[in-house]
Amino acid sequence: MATTRTKRPPAAPATSGTRPVWIHEDDPAPGWAEEVRALAAERDAVILAHNYQLPAVQDVADHVGDSLALSRIAASVPHRQIVFCGVHFMAETAKILAPAKQVLIPDPAAGCSLAATITADQLRAWKAEHPGAVVVAYVNTTAEVKAESDVCCTSSNAVDVVASIDPAREVLFVPDRHLGAHVARVTGRDLHLWDGQCHVHDEIGGEVLAQAIAEDPAADVLVHPECACATSALEMAASGAIKADRIRIVSTGGMLDEARRTRVDRVLVATEVGMLHQLRRANPDVRFDPVDPWAVCPYMKMTTPTTLLTCLRDGRGEVHVDPATATRARAAVERMITIGAGGAP
């Protein structure tokens, strides 16, 4: 069971609710990847890239993964500098976990519509309405929101995080209502959910999923729990519209695990389309197709070969987090890292 915060937070950035255009560069300058690697070596930098980044950026990175995997890497790499190809909250998280390192993001304007749905002031006000409640914050939040939280989570360990909390305690889950509803279903906990959402995953609804399945009912289906269609996926499985064992609601790390072991001919994937690159590399014999080919995050596509090169050449895009805020946020993030295993969004 879950109760959703009825007062909607302020609107997400202007791109929310629109069909974004895939921002990309078709023809990177010749030799750009070699220059990136040379500059990284010169700077003693490690390049981290999220699964939703452009394929070219993923291919040049030292490590590609989801939020949890990249957080763990950021906390342990020996390099002097971290270049984070992702969105701003991810680079912030790296800085929180590695305060002595210089953290750069190729485009500081790469925000997150989900993180924008809640502020620290809003969370403090909500906490005041529920004294004694445990705040579980999805990692897709700002450093200030993390600092007001008790523990962070990713889509891969959110169930484990909530299950670890005393059943007698109230839980405030922020900010993603779709992930929160999924966690509530799995754990049976009565969660209070903030009414936030990723504008890309929110547009992958039940009708979109139903149409994709109707066109190829023999395909397996992987659904990210941030998607609006997660509930519909379970309902379709329960109704017999598709066999229950053909639909899995999993994080991006879980999708990679499924990709490596599947033996089917085709898999439909409900998440941001950048994920397809890693899935296809994991199992080239399987056809991986998006449930919604328009599911493109414009923020994730703001890192391009050019912005990455500029970042490394000039040292631009350094990420700073207030030390006091970072100290408070670090406790919540470190708890996240110790709970559960696997990958995240």
Image (cartoon, rainbow, N blue to C red):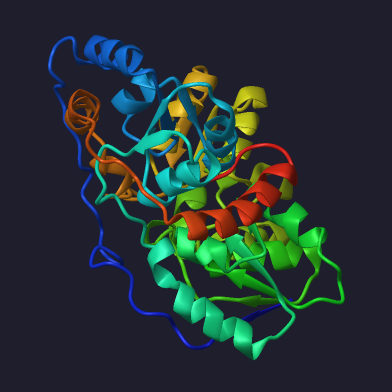
Label count reads: 0
Tell me: residue 99, above or below residue 200.
Answer: above
Residue at 52% in and 49% down: 213
Q: Going by the image, does 312 lie left or right of 195?
A: left
Q: Position of residue 2 (x, y in %)?
A: 69, 77
Residue 92, compared with residue 7, is above or below; it is: above
Residue drawn at the location 48% of the way across and 36% of the way down: 100
Q: Residue at x 68, y 86 (%)?
A: 130
Front residue of 145/21: it is 145
The correct choice, above or below, for 77 with respect to 33 in the image is below
Image quarter of residue 314: top left
Residue in the picture at 55% in, 63% down: 147
| Depicted 35 relative to depicted 95: above or below | above
Residue 241 % position (x, y): 63, 56
Left or right of 238? Residue 92 is left
| Viewport quadrant of the N terminus | bottom right
- In the image, 125 versus 238, the foreground residue is 125
Q: Nearer the viewer, residue 194 or 178?
A: 194
Estimate the x, y position of residue 212 in percent, counting from the top left. 46, 50
Q: Nearer the viewer, residue 249 or 233?
A: 249
Is residue 157 among the parts visible in the rendering? no
Residue 281 at least partly seen: yes
Judge left or right: residue 331 versus residue 213: right
